[in-house]
Image (cartoon, helix red, strand yellow):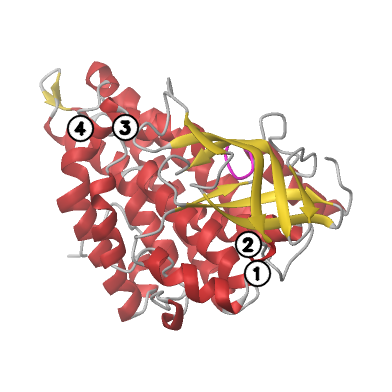
């Protein structure tokens, strides 16, 4: 008799992982099961980020996981970082967003573009969760066109004076530092701005129906003065922030897999126990067709992200490949979350079940760091050689 397959891993993708990668997934998975899932529904209801979990997240080595140990990171490979994102988002997209911003959008640019002094000063306490960062790129009018940047930094003696505003900034009101991208007379440049600097203001965004267990803010800069030592010296132009976004988008290709797996697991349990017309809902053909389609799409996403991770670790990953996986996997997850909500019936609209929470969160995930349309056009440009933006 054949061994029954894991319904959340039909192609046994786990067998393709190294022992170290499986260990990382298991440790984060236990943390999510024991510490996140018991509270995250209430956090979402209350619009509260569970910041009490930050020391544990840091203690597991999840902040700056791929940063070398010499700077306080865990020195993990790209696949391990992807698995971290997958397991955290199985808990909630807001938790994965927190770790993504800290790791890929704040620690990565300091590591990749910063001075040795900046790396030694900021990265170890950031890995320890003692210094939290946010990433200031998106502006109120900007969205998918970051080159249309209004925030500017003017040289004044040995200092820079920053004026402008940023919008939809994860961790904004939690952050001790902001990685701020601004127009200068020498192109777009990045600055590490302590959030207690005079003229800096973070204003939390409320009335959100998505990522409610996450801190989202607007940032304002009114003659914010920083020394030249705050400037990231080793990059100029849009390639700086876009390089950070490629790192973060890579993690986002993995995260929605976890959200989709959580939704599928929930409806598998529910349909096995829910009796309608004298038989389990799982025995209904229409339900089985929906479940099978979910498993097919999750399997495709798993294989896409794993191969993307192997390319990343081999130094061969291209931004277009990240766009394809982000587009596919976010669409997969939001469709599955919505379908699971439907199968749950009326019970599916409450946060006692996870599907509606994941579906609402994924409305943000499919939009931020490149909308679905933008990523489709990135792939289209690769295929045709013509930029349709």
Which mark is in front, 4 or 1? 1
Q: Which numbered circle lies on residue 355? A: 3
Q: Alpha carbon of mark 4 to alpha carbon of mark 3: how far?
A: 14 Å
Say which residue label 2 marks: 230
Tell me which numbered mark, 3 or 1, is placed earlier along the sequence.
1
Question: Which quadrant of the figure has residue 21?
Answer: bottom left
Depth check: 10 or 17 in front? 17
Q: Residue at x 25, y 16 (%)?
A: 346
Say which residue label 4 marks: 271
Magenta part of the chain:
367-371
- Residue 169, percent across and down? 53, 40
Packing grade of label 4 (10 A; few <14, some 14-19, many >=20) is: some
Q: Alpha carbon of mark 3 to alpha carbon of mark 1: how far?
A: 39 Å
Which mark is in front, 3 or 2? 2
User: Above or below — where is 206 with respect to 247?
Assistant: above
- Find numbered disc 4 in the image and state the secondary structure of the residue it sits on: helix
Residue extending furthest toward the front:
157
């Amino acid at each position: 008799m054949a061994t029954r397959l894991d319904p959340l891993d039909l192609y046994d993708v786990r067998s393709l992982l190294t022992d170290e990668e499986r260990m990382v997934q298991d440790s984060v998975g236990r943390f999510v099961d024991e510490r996140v899932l018991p509270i995250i529904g209430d956090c979402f209801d209350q619009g509260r980020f569970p910041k009490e979990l930050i020391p544990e997240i840091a203690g597991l080595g999840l902040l700056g996981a791929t940063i070398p140990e010499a700077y306080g990171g865990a020195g993990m490979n790209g696949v391990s970082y992807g698995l971290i994102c997958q397991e955290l988002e199985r808990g909630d997209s807001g938790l994965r967003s927190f770790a993504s911003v800290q790791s890929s959008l704040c620690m990565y640019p300091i590591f990749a573009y910063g001075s040795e002094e900046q790396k030694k000063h900021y990265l170890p306490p950031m890995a320890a969760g003692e210094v939290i960062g946010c990433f200031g790129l998106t502006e109120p009018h900007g969205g998918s066109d970051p080159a249309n940047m209004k925030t500017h930094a003017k040289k004044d003696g040995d200092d820079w004076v920053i004026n402008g505003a940023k919008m939809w900034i994860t961790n904004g009101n939690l952050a001790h530092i902001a990685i701020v991208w601004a127009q200068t007379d020498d192109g777009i440049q990045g600055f590490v701005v302590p959030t207690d600097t005079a003229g800096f203001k973070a204003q939390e965004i409320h009335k959100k129906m998505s990522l409610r267990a996450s801190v989202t803010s607007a940032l304002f800069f009114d003659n914010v003065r920083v020394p030249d030592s705050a400037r990231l010296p080793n990059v100029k132009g849009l390639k700086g922030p876009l390089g950070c976004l490629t790192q973060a988008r890579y993690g986002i290709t993995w995260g929605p897999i976890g959200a989709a797996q959580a939704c599928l697991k929930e409806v598998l349990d529910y349909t096995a126990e829910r009796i309608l017309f004298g038989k389990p809902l799982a025995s209904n053909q229409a339900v089985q067709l929906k479940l099978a389609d979910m498993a097919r799409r999750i399997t495709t996403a798993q294989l896409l992200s794993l191969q993307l991770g192997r390319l990343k670790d081999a130094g061969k990953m291209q931004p277009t490949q990240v766009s394809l996986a982000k587009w596919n996997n976010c669409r997969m997850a939001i469709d599955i979350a919505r379908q699971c909500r439907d199968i749950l019936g009326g019970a599916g609209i409450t946060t006692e079940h996870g599907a509606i929470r994941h579906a609402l969160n994924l409305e943000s995930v499919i939009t931020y760091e490149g909308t679905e349309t933008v990523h489709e056009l990135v792939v289209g440009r690769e295929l045709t050689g013509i930029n349709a933006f």
